Structure formats: structure tokens, C-alpha cells
Image: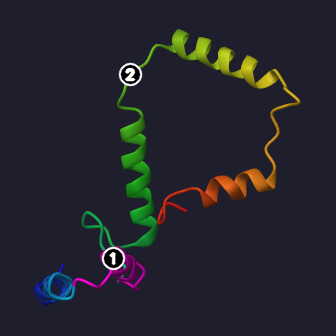
Amino acid sequence: MQYGMYRSRIKVKEQFAKSIMENRTRDFWSEINRMKNSKAGICNIVDGVGNSSDIASLFADKYEELYSSVPYDHDDMASLKVEIMSAVDEYNEECIVSFNNVVEAVNSLKHGKK
């Protein structure tokens, strides 16, 4: 990040903190959401890589490394898969999720989690 951009972000944060402290009627979370929803610049370089397809490959490699870093027992995984599949195969007519159920569940989430 360039020094000027860094200083600019620090200044914005300092001004935000000062205005919240001086004007207690301002809603802290409304201000945070407003800042979060503002258009921010997109980073063009990740770990020294600047090409978008190379960045995508970098992320794919990192996730592959992350998800393959934990050893597991193949027999335990096969047993778990059988258990899950048998539970999925047991259809229960009482277990129906409607569109309204989904809407109700989403609406019950905390603000900012939707």
C-alpha cells in the first residue's frame, strides 16, 4: 500500500473516532455500515502476483494446501460418509422447508449477517 493512501485511511479513521466521541447522538453501527458499504479500491497485487488469473491460482493453491494439511483416517471418513448418506436417504414427510421458512430464518439473522 502506498504511504499516501495509508495516511489518508488513518486520517479518515481518526476523523470518524473524533466525530463519534464529540457527537454522541450519532449511531456507531450505522456509521460503520456506511463506511463498509462505501466503494473501496481493489487490490491489484497479492503476494507479489498482479495478474488476475495468477491471483486466482495463488488462492487455489493456498486453499488446497490448507484443506489437505490435516491428516485423516480413510476408514473413518468412509464410515462417516455411509452414516450421512443413510441419514439423507431416510426421507421424512414432516421435514419440508418452504420458501417462507427460509425467508423467516434469514429475517431473524442479526443485522449485517444477511
Relative depth, front residue between 27 and 70: 27
As drawn, the residue found furthest toward the front would be 25
Residue 56 picture quarter: bottom left
Residue at x-position 66% and y-position 15%: 83
Q: Is residue 102 magenta?
A: no
Give the mark toward the camera: 1 or 2: 1
* Left or right: 95 in relation to 73: right
Dot 1, crowdedness within 10 Å: few (<14), some or many (≥20)? few
Relative depth, front residue between 56 and 103: 103
Q: Position of residue 96 (x, y in %)?
A: 82, 39
Q: Position of residue 28 (x, y in %)?
A: 30, 76
Q: Which residue is mark 2?
A: 71
Q: Which residue is mark 1?
A: 32
Q: Position of residue 61 (x, y in %)?
A: 40, 48
Residue at x-position 35% and y-position 31%: 69
Q: Position of residue 82 (x, y in %)?
A: 68, 15
Amino acid under label 2?
Pro
Relative depth, front residue between 107 and 70: 107
Residue range of the region highlighted in magenta in the rendering: 24-40
Q: Is residue 28 magenta?
A: yes
* Rendered-image quadrant of the N terminus: bottom left
Q: Which badge, 1 or 2, is on the more N-terminal residue?
A: 1
Dot 2, crowdedness within 10 Å: few (<14), some or many (≥20)? few
Residue 11, compared with residue 60, is above or below; it is below
